[in-house]
């Protein structure tokens, strides 16, 4: 085992953190995920990698920078050798950032103001995210033609990552094109050096296959800061041959208790998953943001509906809706207020479900997951088996329920197959 963690990761939302931790575990790294920055800087963590999960994707840029720098300082106190800033594979944040400002701040802290060099690579081919000629694709579509164009919080209308990143960072942005990437790690490293000699501080890197991620990962050996989606995590562990790859790195305690799903994401993928769950005849309760705003006790209504149904199988409580419906609500309540009302309501419902005996809980949506995990008082997560690419089961404990082990699956809105909500619980019943 490693004497100390070698890789320290900062994730800008909670589902992204578990996505990253999942890929590190798949590659054999013993990984611990913390919820926020731990208060005790002296506490040693027995792991090869640590993932600090923040909820910083859509907050004001200066707050995202402050939180990310606090995570950096704590990870440095753990003695890590490399920092990994993880964002979504659809590269989405607010128009003002926060990917560029956080990248600048981390580079300034690690290598000096205006100095240093890092990459941008949200590619995750296993999840249909690829980068070619600096353009991000979702499946066969440019990002700007995909459902992300109409995302209610972070719409992405430009697939050119060089242009998007250059609008957010003070440093010149360059490109490592696929013509170089396909030649392997040595060619990628040479391109890095050439770009740095030209004064480039951030390089978008093309990747369309798993082999590309492995080559890029090897070329990143020794780079103080890596910024990427979760895919690059598959290629980094090879740089630490002493890291002990464990066949059972994903083993979790046996699952017990009742089952439920809480969904706040309004992505196309999650809409499909909600529809599939309902078409299979499973019970589902729709949360109406306008009813919340009107003062209705939606939490009590949802829990009164759920409690008699829970012993029969998983139930779903959802605020997931199609784009037009979401926009209509936002027009009446405002984007920020609508999102906050839904997050607060779903997180309180999640707490009520656990109080009612739920110990296996799927949460869909990055913002919703962050709110739920914080409401549950979770501080650390053990990463378990993968349900779908980018989404593992985790095991957690909370001071609110000291005698219970809770199994949580935090799903990014864009991830997972149509049958994800039902498949997830079937996987958890299988022996590790």
Image (cartoon, helix red, strand yellow):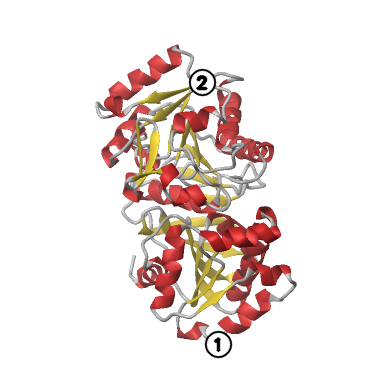
Ranked by sequence position, the earlier of labels 1 and 2 is: 2
Taking the image as drawn, is residue 50 in sight? Answer: yes
- Residue 238 in the image: above or below residue 375: above
Residues 100 and 244: in front is 100
> Residue at label 1?
308
Residues 277 and 49: in front is 277
Residue contact between numbered discs 1 and 2, judged by CB atoms under 8 Å: no
Mark 2 closeness class: few <14, some 14–19, many ≥20 residues within 10 Å: some
- Side (left or right) of 347 relative to 237: right
Seen at 62% across and 59% down, the residue is 371
Taking the image as drawn, is residue 373 in sight? Answer: no
Secondary structure under the numbered disc 2 in the rendered image: loop
Seen at 38% across and 78% down, the residue is 280
> Residue at label 2?
172
Q: Which mark is residue 234?
A: none
> Residue 171 in the image: x percent, y percent?
54, 22
Seen at 54% across and 55% down, the residue is 366
Secondary structure under the numbered disc 1 in the rendered image: loop
Report the residue that reaches farthest toward the top.
Answer: 197
- Residue 199 in the image: above or below residue 381: above
Report the residue that reaches farthest toward the right.
Answer: 295
Residues 38 and 264: in front is 264
> Residue 28 in the image: x percent, y percent?
35, 47
> Residue 100 in the image: x percent, y percent?
56, 32
- Residue 84 in the image: above or below residue 323: above
Q: Which quadrant would the N terminus be assigned to in this image?
A: top left
> Residue 125 in the image: x percent, y percent?
32, 45
Residues 414 and 63: in front is 414
């Amino acid at each position: 085992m490693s004497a100390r963690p070698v890789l320290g990761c900062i994730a800008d939302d909670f589902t992204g953190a578990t996505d990253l931790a999942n890929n590190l575990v798949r590659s054999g790294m013993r990984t611990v995920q913390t919820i926020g920055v731990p208060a005790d800087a002296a506490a040693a963590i027995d792991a090869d990698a640590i993932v600090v999960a923040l909820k910083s994707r859509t907050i004001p840029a200066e707050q995202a920078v402050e939180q990310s720098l606090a995570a950096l300082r704590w990870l440095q106190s753990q003695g890590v050798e490399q920092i990994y800033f993880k964002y979504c594979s659809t590269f989405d944040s607010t128009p003002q950032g926060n990917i560029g400002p956080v990248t600048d701040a981390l580079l300034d802290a690690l290598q000096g103001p205006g100095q240093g060099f890092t990459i941008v690579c949200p590619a995750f081919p296993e999840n249909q995210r690829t980068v070619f000629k600096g353009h991000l694709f979702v499946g066969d579509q440019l990002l700007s033609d995909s459902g992300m164009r109409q995302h209610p919080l972070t719409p992405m209308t430009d697939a050119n990552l060089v242009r998007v990143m250059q609008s957010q960072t003070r440093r010149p942005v360059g490109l490592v094109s696929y013509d170089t990437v396909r030649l392997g790690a040595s060619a990628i490293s040479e391109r890095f050096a050439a770009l740095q000699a030209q004064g480039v501080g951030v390089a978008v890197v093309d990747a369309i296959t798993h082999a590309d991620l492995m080559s890029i990962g090897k070329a990143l050996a020794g780079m103080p800061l890596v910024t990427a989606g979760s895919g690059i995590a598959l290629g980094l562990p090879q740089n630490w041959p002493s890291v002990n790859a464990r066949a059972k790195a994903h083993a979790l305690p046996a699952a017990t208790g009742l089952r439920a799903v809480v969904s706040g994401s309004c992505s196309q993928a999650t809409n499909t998953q909600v529809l599939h769950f309902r078409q299979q005849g499973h019970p589902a309760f729709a949360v109406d943001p306008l009813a919340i705003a009107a003062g209705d006790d939606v939490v009590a209504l949802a829990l009164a509906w759920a409690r008699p149904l829970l012993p029969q199988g998983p139930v779903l409580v959802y605020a997931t809706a199609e784009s037009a419906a979401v926009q209509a609500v936002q027009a009446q309540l405002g984007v920020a207020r609508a999102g906050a009302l839904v997050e607060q309501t779903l997180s309180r419902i999640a707490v009520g479900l656990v109080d009612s005996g739920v110990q296996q809980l799927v949460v869909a949506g990055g913002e919703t997951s962050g709110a739920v995990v914080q409401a549950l008082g979770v501080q650390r997560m053990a990463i378990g088996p993968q349900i779908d690419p980018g989404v593992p089961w985790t095991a957690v404990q909370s001071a609110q329920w000291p005698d219970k082990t809770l199994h949580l699956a935090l799903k990014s809105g864009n991830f997972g197959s149509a049958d994800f909500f039902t498949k997830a619980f079937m996987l958890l019943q299988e022996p590790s």
